[in-house]
Image: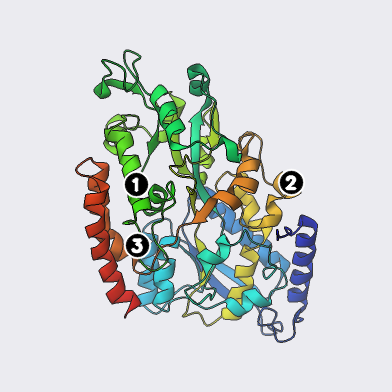
Amino acid sequence: MARTRLSRRDFIKLMGISAASAAAGTQFFRGSPAFAAPNRQGPTTITFMGWGDVAEDEGVRAAIAVFEAEQDEVRVTWMHTPDNYNEKLLANVAAGTPPDTAFISQSQFRTLVHDGLTTDITDYVMSDPLLSQEDYFVQPQETQRCTDENGRWHGIGSTWTANHLFINKDLFEEAGIEPPDFDDDKIWDWDTFLEAARLLTKDANGRHPGDAGFDVDNVVQWGFYYDTSWWMTFDQLAKVNGGALSDGQLLTLDTPEALAGIQAFADLIHVHHVMPQAVFFNELGMSATQMLDTRRLAMVLDGSWALSYMYVVPSLGVGPVPVLSPNGQASGQGHLHCILKGSQKVEAAWKWLRFLATPFYQTHFCKLGLWIPNQTAMLTEEGMDEWITEGMHPANYRKFVSEYIPKHMSPTLVPAGFPRAQSIFYPALERVMNGEGPAAELIPPAVAEANAVLTAEYINA
């Protein structure tokens, strides 16, 4: 039976009741740890560590100002750490001085949970009258990414980001190609995508791949590009064909589905000649945004956060991830907000985490094109009116976030120990993308070696 999405009116009503209860020091549910009695000895100061550029830094500071204005029990010290974040976070933990709360990358989350470095917040989440609502978050994706193997919550997603196409609409129009869209019947299958990418790739003489005399060494307009060098992209390579990076515990890039997806992307470079290698960008000294803007590139697959800077392309459009099989999906992720295990101020830290999981915080960043909501009330028509911004979000963005994301996006599940595993399997993936051998030959041995380490050091440890 279909579930009824929490309306924005009910959402705001519950948020107001819950906030008022917390501010008054009452317990909305008797015995709930989320609404403890007020601290009568002055405010408690907690620390919050995170990364981010100027816009994210300013957004966090604005959130702190609002949070502190709404109540007088908790104060937040922002530890802005824009560089070498994971290393500095772990150094603080090792020194016995962890922040009370922090950004945790999805690539690191399960490793920190496994190592006992995060606080179990399940009781807080389940007893909260707002966050415990069945349809408060986009589900089941939120639960999938925030819980451990026993279903216990150790964080709350800050947001969602998901892969989609960014396109130069002028180049599509000139080529007579109708762009894909987020309706189910307008999501491109791989053959349709390949033909479009072929027609949108041209050498200096106007020839396309497959045409007699096509010069792959003198391409002036590429059809497609995807940077396959970081952890979220490994999942997307597999997901176009119904595979995945991991099942949550072990890598699954060696399944037939994942291998076919990886090979399909490598073939875009070495067989179909519609995608340049990364070195091409380095040689040009241009970003994908500049390539789209200067008509050197027709399509790029990237995370939705890229809209925050790609919006400057005058003819920018967006579309869904092309799929190799009917089970293909877009990969999604977003950092989590967690309470670190060493915190001595868990009650105060929870009040801050809960505030971060309400609309004010996300709305600021959604307006900037940086994030997309993980709260369903923000995906109603009324909710989207609060953050969809003319001049920033393309016309079909409402359909992307409210229809495509809940149905066609699945979170990247990153196993505990992934940083160690990545160092083992990534060289093999890089060789495939460089055309040094087929995925079916190079990937499985590397994944087996990485999984042996994960099994020994994390699953059986």
The answer to which quarter of the image holds residue 36 is bottom right
Residue 323 appears anywhere in the view: yes
Q: Name the residue under label 3.
A: 251
Disc 2 target residue:
381
Q: In which quarter of the image is the N terminus?
A: bottom right
> Mark 3: which amino acid?
Leu
Residue 375 falls left or right of residue 161: right
| Residue 78 in sight here | no
Say which quarter of the image contains residue 355: bottom right
Identify the residue at image location x=33%, y=16%: 207
- Counting residues from the start of the chain, the first of labels 2 and 3 encountered is 3
Q: Residue 260 carries which label?
A: 1
Q: Which residue lies at the image location 45% right of the left edge and 44% below the top edge?
A: 325
Secondary structure found at label 3: loop
Label 2 amino acid? Glu
The alpha-carbon separation of the residues under discs 2 and 3 comes to 38 Å
Q: Is tag 1's residue or tag 2's residue first in the polypeptide sequence?
A: 1
Q: Where's residue 242, x and y in %?
A: 44, 51
Q: Which of marks 1 and 3 is nearer the N terminus?
A: 3
Work out whether 152 lies above or below 301.
below
Q: In this view, does 392 lie above or below 248?
A: above
Q: In this view, does 331 lie above or below 280?
A: below
Tally of marks: 3
